[in-house]
Image (cartoon, rainbow, N blue to C red):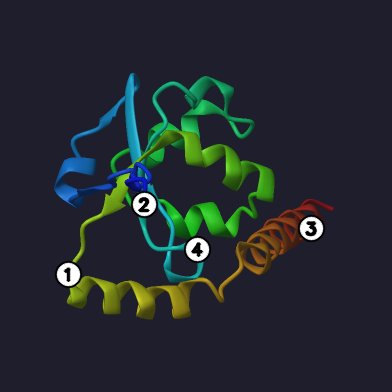
């Protein structure tokens, strides 16, 4: 009988939010993306990707060192973008039970809010303001 050799398992590191927060320079961009629906919060090093990001590098710089999951989900990234993200994985976010519950609450409240109605309201207010100003000048 032969000896079976176990398949090599990739060891996934756990990274604290304090560690993620240290990576905020233009050449060192880490962020957290993920939630319970997507396999949990994960830490990504996007330093070599920022200038290839279709939405521009600036948004990644703004979110560096933070939990960017809500923004990532609200902007509706494609399945391809989610798959591409895998190559930048550093590890899982290390969080305790209290933080896990807090993230669940935040996810259930913030993910239900779309930015589109807010943007529409702001645009309508600006248009209304300019229309009333034009009437006063006439």
Residue ID at (58%, 47%): 82
- Of labels 4 and 1, earlier in sequence is 4
The residue identified by callout 2 is 42
Alpha-carbon distance for marks 4 and 3? 46 Å
Labels 1 and 2: the sequence-earlier one: 2
Looking at the image, residue 80 lies above or below residue 102 = above
Q: CA distance from mark 1 to mark 2?
A: 14 Å
Quick one: 59 or 22, which is closer to the camera? 22
Distance between mark 4 and mark 2 Cα atoms? 10 Å
Residue 131: quarter of image: bottom right
Would residue 64 be seen by someone viewing this image from the given angle?
A: yes
Q: CA distance from mark 3 to mark 1?
A: 53 Å
Residue at the disc numbered 3: 131
- Image depth: mark 4 or mark 3 in front: 4
Q: Secondary structure at mark 1?
A: loop
Image mark count: 4
Residue marked by disc 1: 96
Question: Which of the marked residues, 4 or 3, is nearer the chain's N terminus?
Answer: 4
Mark 1 Cα within 10 Å, few/some/many (few <14, many 20+)? few
- How far apart are labels 4 and 1 at the CA level? 18 Å
Which quadrant of the view contains residue 62?
top left
* Foreground: disc 3 or disc 1: 1
Earlier sequence position, callout 3 versus callout 1: 1
Percent x, y of residue 112: 56, 76
Secondary structure beneath label 2: strand
């Amino acid at each position: 009988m032969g000896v079976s050799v176990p398949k090599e398992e990739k060891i996934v590191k756990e990274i604290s939010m304090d560690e993620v927060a240290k990576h905020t320079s233009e050449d060192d961009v880490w962020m957290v993306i993920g939630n319970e629906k997507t396999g949990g919060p994960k830490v990504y090093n996007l330093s070599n990707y920022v200038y290839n990001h279709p939405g521009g590098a600036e948004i990644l710089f703004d979110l560096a060192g933070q939990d960017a999951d809500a923004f990532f989900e609200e902007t509706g990234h494609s399945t391809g973008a989610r798959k591409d993200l895998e190559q930048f994985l550093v590890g899982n976010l290390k969080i305790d039970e209290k933080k896990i519950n807090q993230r669940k609450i935040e996810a259930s409240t913030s993910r239900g809010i779309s930015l589109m109605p807010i943007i529409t309201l702001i645009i309508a207010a600006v248009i209304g303001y300019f229309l009333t100003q034009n009437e006063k000048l006439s």
